[in-house]
């Protein structure tokens, strides 16, 4: 199975008509359709070409700049999936990407109060554009939680790299389970997502974007050592689409091993999707099981129907109270009680034996000394 986790989806949201009555009020989300017939036909043609090239898991990407406000933001991917014609054996996913800048440091909507809203997306992605937001994405938003960031997409086509790729930040993000994304559209000098161009997170000039991409992507591969990388398309025009194996061969030019380049298109995205779905399932379980700090209700004994209690012990059954107590020390020792006390007769006999043994030893010593004296007298 081959994966393309970045198929940009752009919509034309109708502008609110200005009026004196609505002046100063917060704009509300409109319920008008987000896709025209021409847009739907273009997306269908784009999907047909991806499927023809061999992709089986396709993720639609909706990009938001700076902040996500649930009051005004609309999940257009739900409407898109309802209007697309079904394709057998193809898995469609929904992804939300948030572009982070200086204004996003104060907050960009990924809070626990909006958890139920973000559950409508399968994958969450962040696009940092400065050092502070990059550190925030790697250290804070990759921790396991209902709002875990699965992908950190680095803008590789900018004329100057917006931040330093520190080893500690990269290592922490990979350890927490996040991956770093490389969009191969920049290597071809193709057209990027209009939302990125509008936010200043991508280069519009194709030749400059290609040169910047090769330098920045090679640095990313060097810092990550080829671990925790996925390769996506990010392609808007169909002329820039490439087959999965062609993309793997293209990535090997970044001094990435062949097996790691193949894994960036197959196994690494697969593990990412499984992890994202697992976090979603756990979140739904925790929402249905309302507990306070993991404290459940008091246990209640439930007796099943037809259960009969065992009969009480009868007189024939021996119990601890019915066992006879030992009447003598010998019986206490035999039954495992205290050690028996020695009798006085046994003590007297042991003393006599000790005296007899000591007397025999002294007599033997005296006889030996007499024999030595007799031998000396005979020699004289």
Image (cartoon, rainbow, N blue to C red):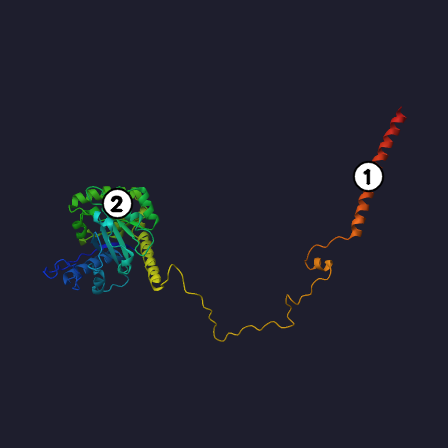
Which of the two labelled residues, at mark 2 and mark 1, occupies the earlier sequence position?
2
> Residue 70's image quarter?
bottom left
Residue behind mark 1: 361
Q: Residues within 10 Å of mark 1 (few under 14, many from 20)?
A: few
Does 320 appear above or below 162? below
Q: In the visual, does 241 lie left or right of 375?
A: left
Residue 293, how many percent across, how many down? Answer: 38, 59
Please name the residue shown 24% across and 58% down the image: 51
Residue in front for this viewpoint, 113 or 161? 113
Please name the residue shown 33% across and 46% down the image: 172
Q: Quadrant of the N terminus?
A: bottom left
Mark 1 secondary-structure assignment: helix
Mark 2 secondary-structure assignment: helix
Q: Is there any visible trace of residue 225 in the rendered image? A: no
Q: CA distance from mark 2 to mark 1?
A: 97 Å
Q: Are marks 2 and 1 in contact (CB under 8 Å)?
A: no
> Residue 45's image quarter?
bottom left
Residue 233, how many percent across, how many down? Answer: 23, 52
Q: Is there any visible trace of residue 133 in the rendered image? A: yes
Residue 87, how many percent across, how many down? Answer: 25, 63
- Residue 132's disc is 2
């Amino acid at each position: 199975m081959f994966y393309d986790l970045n198929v940009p989806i752009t919509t034309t949201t109708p502008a609110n008509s200005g009026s004196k009555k609505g002046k100063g009020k917060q704009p509300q989300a409109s319920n008008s359709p987000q896709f025209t017939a021409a847009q739907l036909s273009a997306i269908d043609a784009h999907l047909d070409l991806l499927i023809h090239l061999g992709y089986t898991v396709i993720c639609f990407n909706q990009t938001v700049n700076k902040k996500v406000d649930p009051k005004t933001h609309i999940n257009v991917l739900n409407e898109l999936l309802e209007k697309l014609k079904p394709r057998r054996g193809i898995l469609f996913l929904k992804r939300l990407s948030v572009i982070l800048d200086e204004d996003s440091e104060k907050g960009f909507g990924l809070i626990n109060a909006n958890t139920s809203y973000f559950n409508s997306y399968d994958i969450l992605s962040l696009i940092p554009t400065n050092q502070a937001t990059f550190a925030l994405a790697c250290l804070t938003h990759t921790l396991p939680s209902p709002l875990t960031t699965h992908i950190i997409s680095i803008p590789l086509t900018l004329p100057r790299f917006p931040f330093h790729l520190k080893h500690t930040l990269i290592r922490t993000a990979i350890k927490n389970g996040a991956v770093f994304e490389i969009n191969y559209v920049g290597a071809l000098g193709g057209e990027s997502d209009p939302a990125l161009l509008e936010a200043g997170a991508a280069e519009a000039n194709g030749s400059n974007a290609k040169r910047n991409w090769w330098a920045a992507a090679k640095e990313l591969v060097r810092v990550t050592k080829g671990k925790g990388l996925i390769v996506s398309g990010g392609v808007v025009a169909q002329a820039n689409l490439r087959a999965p194996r062609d993309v793997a061969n293209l990535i090997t030019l970044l001094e990435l091993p062949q097996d790691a380049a193949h894994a960036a298109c197959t196994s690494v995205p697969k593990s990412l999707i499984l992890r994202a779905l697992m976090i979603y399932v756990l979140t739904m379980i925790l929402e249905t099981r309302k507990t306070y700090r993991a404290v459940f209700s008091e246990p209640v004994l439930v007796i099943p129907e037809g259960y009969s209690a065992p009969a009480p012990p009868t007189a024939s059954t021996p119990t601890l109270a019915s066992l006879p107590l030992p009447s003598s020390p010998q019986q206490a020792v035999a039954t495992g009680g205290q050690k028996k006390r020695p009798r006085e007769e046994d003590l007297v006999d042991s003393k006599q034996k000790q005296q007899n043994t000591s007397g025999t030893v002294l007599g033997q010593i005296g006889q030996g000394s007499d024999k030595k004296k007799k031998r000396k007298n005979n020699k004289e």
